[in-house]
Structure formats: C-alpha cells, structure tokens
Image (tube, rainbow, N blue to C red):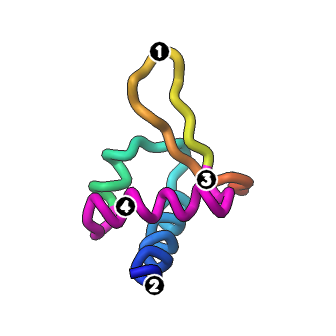
Amino acid sequence: MIENIGKSAGIIWTFLDEQTEPVTLSKIKNGVDLSATLVQMALGWLAREDKIIIEMPEDSFSYKISLKNKTVI
C-alpha cells in the first residue's frame, strides 16, 4: 500500500505542477485517475514531505492546494 500512496503522490505532484494557480480538492479528484481515498492519502504524503501548501481563504469554505516552491514561467 505504501508504494501505491507514493506513486499516487507523484501523480498528484505532476498534476499540481501543471496548474497555474492553487486548486481545490475537487479539482484534484476530477483531474487524476485515482480513488478519493488514494488522493487524500497522497496529499497527506505530500504535506508530510513539505511539498504542498494547503490554504483556506477567509472568504471561502474550500481548501486551495498548490506546490511549494513552484517556478512560474
């Protein structure tokens, strides 16, 4: 299972790297071919590895997720 979570984290990392702005959890779930459970576990992996930023804007009830140290071209 650990291997599946690691591979899923890589898939989500790639998806986030292709985004131009922070995205919602729903957008991630719709944008990758993974179960909701694997998405959540992979996001936990990325958070633990300090690879993502998870923020909740004051005027919203949705989390926004983006990569840390993303180079914007």
For the N terminus, the image quarter is bottom left
For residue 32, above or below residue 54 = below
Q: Which residue is drawn at 34% across and 66% down?
A: 38
- Upstream in sequence: badge 3 or badge 2: 2
The secondary element bearing badge 4 is classed as: helix
Q: How many labels does the image show?
A: 4
Indicate the amino acid at tag 1: Asp
Q: What's the mark number on residue 59?
A: 1
Q: Is the magenta stretch mostly helix, strand or loop?
A: helix
Q: Residues within 10 Å of mark 2 (few under 14, many from 20)?
A: few
Q: Which mark is residue 3?
A: 2
Residue 9 x %, y %: 49, 69
Q: Is residue 50 magenta?
A: yes
Q: Do the residues bearing badges 3 and 2 touch, measured as CB atoms within 8 Å? A: no
On the image, numbered disc 4 is attached to which residue? 39
In this rendering, is residue 3 above or below 20? below
In the rendering, at what x and y percent does residue 65 appear?
51, 45
Q: How far apart are marks 3 and 2 (CA)?
A: 20 Å
